[in-house]
Amino acid sequence: DVFSLSRHGNVTIDHIIRTVAEQFKVTSNDLKGKKRTKTIVLPRQVAMYIARDITEYSTTELGLEFGGRDHTTVMHSCQKIDELLKLDPTMEATIQKLTMSIKQSSLKT
């Protein structure tokens, strides 16, 4: 019961997008939009990775939430972040910090 509660909780995709956008100094609309510049792609991939990790949404549902993207885009994003985590130790800290922030603020609501 405790596991499913912490995994599901009140975490929304919008909340994840807002938190990640704030951290990377981009807008929520950027993360949902069509732009593919490096400054937007990485935060978008991080948001998809965290959403996949802490919610029960399918890759198809996540793709729709991120501007109508295909489920394979979500899978690719998660794979890219997995690879980046192996190469960049600061990325792991960033993702852990964001995940904790999202979980804590969702408990307050």
Image (cartoon, helix red, strand yellow):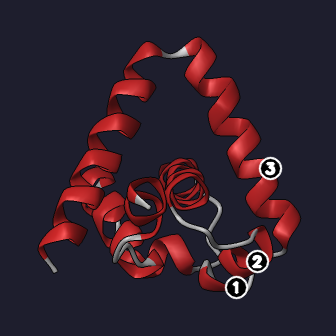
Q: Please rate how many residues cluster around mark 1, counting C-alpha atoms within 10 Å: few if below 14, some from 14 to 19, many from 20.
A: some
First in sequence: mark 3 vs mark 1? 1
The reply to whether callout 1 and callout 2 are in contact (CB within 8 Å) is yes
Identify the residue at horizontal 44%, vertical 14% (top origin): 89
| Disc 1 from disc 2: Cα separation | 6 Å
Q: Which residue is at 47% across, 74% downward?
A: 30
Q: Are marks 3 and 1 in contact (CB under 8 Å)?
A: no
Residue 46 in the image, given as x and y percentages of width and height: 52, 49
Q: Position of residue 95 (x, y in %)?
A: 40, 39
Q: Amino acid at mark 1?
A: Leu
Distance from Cα at disc 2 to Cα at disc 3: 11 Å
Q: Quick check: 75 left or right of 33? A: right
- Find residue 36 and report its image quarter: bottom right
Q: What residue lies at 27% left-to-right and 39% top-to-bottom? A: 97
Q: Are marks 2 and 3 in contact (CB under 8 Å)?
A: no
Instruction: Tell me, for residue 69, which label it has, or none.
Output: 2
Q: Residue at x 75, y 39 (%)?
A: 79
As displayed, is residue 43 above or below residue 80? below
Q: Residue furthest front?
A: 1
Q: Secondary structure at mark 3?
A: helix
Q: What numbered label is drawn on residue 64?
A: 1
* Residue under numbered circle 3: 76
Nearest to the observer: residue 38 or residue 90: 90
Q: Is residue 106 left or right of residue 89?
A: left
Is 83 placed left or right of 101 in the picture?
right
